[in-house]
Image (spheres, rainbow, N blue to C red):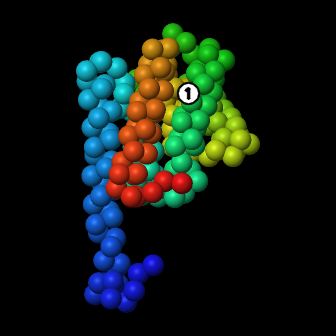
Amino acid sequence: MSTPADQSSSGQDDTDRPRALVAALLCLVVLTISGAVGLATAQPWLFPSLGPTVMLFFTAPKQHASRPMNALVGHLVAIIVGYGCFLAFGLAGSTAAPTGGLTLGYVAAGAVSVALTTLVLQLIRLPHPPAGATTLIVSLGILSEPLQLLDMAGAVLLVTVAGWALNRVTSNGQS
């Protein structure tokens, strides 16, 4: 809780700027580490839904969706459901939606994968909204090879452990 002395002339809490800078730097560190693993292994250890995941870790660490368990389970469910939809809608062997064009099969796989991921995560009470992007990445064929899926899981584990550790070290405090 800030006091009137903590308020700048714009009415903004003077502690907001340092917190924002710390959050930005921690996002930079964690995603750089993940990207470095990707460069070293020539595998997809940096993909779009990791961005909002680390942003949650460092900008809203006390939110339920920011907990390490939510991130780990959320992305794991998303990968499994996304791959299941990718296969169930007969998309294996197809060119990924962004390069081959959106088809009825990709629309169905994408929509169903997000719906099922949402359903499962809500039912088990482990919501993690960035998982919605992960399931789309898989169901749209962007990353759909088994090795890529394992790399995605490894990257999620890495950024989650790094995020948790950095929040502990910086006293940013995850629940």
Residue 142 seen in this snapshot: no
Q: Tag 1: residue type? A: Ile
Residue 118 percent coordinates (x, y): 66, 41
Q: Which residue is farthest bottom?
A: 4
Q: How many callouts does the rendering have?
A: 1
* Left or right of residue 4: residue 92: right
Residue 161 seen in this snapshot: yes
Residue 61 percent coordinates (x, y): 47, 56
Q: Say which quarter of the image contains residue 77.
A: top right
Residue 172 percent coordinates (x, y): 40, 58
Q: Which residue is farthest right?
A: 123
Residue located 51% across and 10% down the image: 93
Eyeballing the image, is 126 above or below 24? above
Q: Say which quarter of the image contains residue 2.
A: bottom left
Q: Which residue position is annotated with label 1?
A: 79
Eyeballing the image, is 43 above or below 128? above
Q: Quadrant of the C terminus?
A: bottom right
Eyeballing the image, is 44 above or below 61? above
Residue located 56% across and 50% down the image: 65
Q: Quadrant of the N terminus?
A: bottom left
Circle 1: is it few (<14), some (14-19), or many (20+) Cα within 10 Å?
Answer: many
* Left or right of residue 119: residue 44: left
Q: Nearer the viewer, residue 140 or 20?
A: 20
Residue located 36% across and 48% down the image: 166
Secondary structure category for the residue under label 1: helix
Q: Say which quarter of the image contains residue 32.
A: top left
Residue 98 percent coordinates (x, y): 43, 28
Residue located 31% across and 50% down the image: 26
